[in-house]
Amino acid sequence: MRALDPDGSQGLLRRLGEAWARSLERLLPELDQAATGPDLEAIRRIAHTLKSSTANLAALHLSAQWQTIEQQCKEGRAEGLADQLAQACAGTLRVREALRAVE
């Protein structure tokens, strides 16, 4: 990310982080609601979105976590999903805080 805007003058990281944080404001409450069912299709859709958006931020480990959740939901497997969601959500919040610190 920094290679695309080495001196930060374009505000690329800030702008990407802000857009991502705005999407989290919508997605995380939706995810909480979907997890109560669990609604595997809704979780799969949200995980797919978060997989892609975290990859765009170069948070590749986190993107891989969301990809695992997406695949598990595609396969219709709910076992262990709550723990995986908790870990991925915690990682997502850590990335959000790290991006805020960069701003």
Image (cartoon, rainbow, N blue to C red):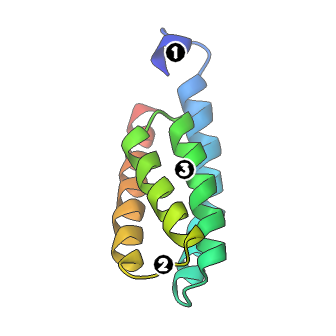
Q: Is residue 64 above or below residue 39?
A: above
Q: Describe the element under mark 1 as helix, strand or loop.
A: loop
* Of labels 2 and 1, the one closer to you: 2
Task: Please state which of residues 73 and 46 is positioned toward the viewer in this rendering.
Answer: 73
Seen at 57% across and 50% down, the residue is 21
Q: Tell me which residue sits at (52%, 82%) in the image.
A: 35
Residue at the farthest top position: 7
- For the residue pair 12 and 85, the one nearer the viewer reads as 85
Does residue 70 lie above or below 102 as drawn? below
Q: Secondary structure at mark 2?
A: loop
Q: Amino acid at mark 3?
A: Lys
Q: Where is mark 2, residue-wise?
A: 77
Name the quadrant containing residue 18.
Answer: top right
Disc 1 crowd rating (10 Å Cα; few below 14, some 14-19, many 20+) is few
Distance between the alpha carbons at the discs numbered 3 and 2? 18 Å
Residue receiving disc 1: 8
Cα distance in 3D space between marks 1 and 3: 25 Å
Residue type pointed to by label 1: Gly
**Amino acid type of the residue that numbered disc 2 sits on in the rendered structure:** Arg
- Vertical position of residue 6 compared to residue 43: above or below: above
Dividing the picture into quarters, in which one does residue 25 lie? Answer: bottom right
Marking on residue 51 = 3
Left or right, residue 71 beside residue 87: right
Point 60% across, 35% down: residue: 16
| Tag in front: 1 or 3 | 3
Q: Position of residue 33 (x, y in %)?
A: 59, 83
Percent coordinates x, y for residue 102 in the rendering: 41, 32
Helix, strand or loop under label 3: helix
- Kindly tell me whether residue 30 is visible in this rendering: no
- Disc tally is 3
For the residues labelled 2 and 1, the Cα–Cα distance comes to 43 Å
Please tell me which of labels 2 and 1 falls first in the chain. Answer: 1
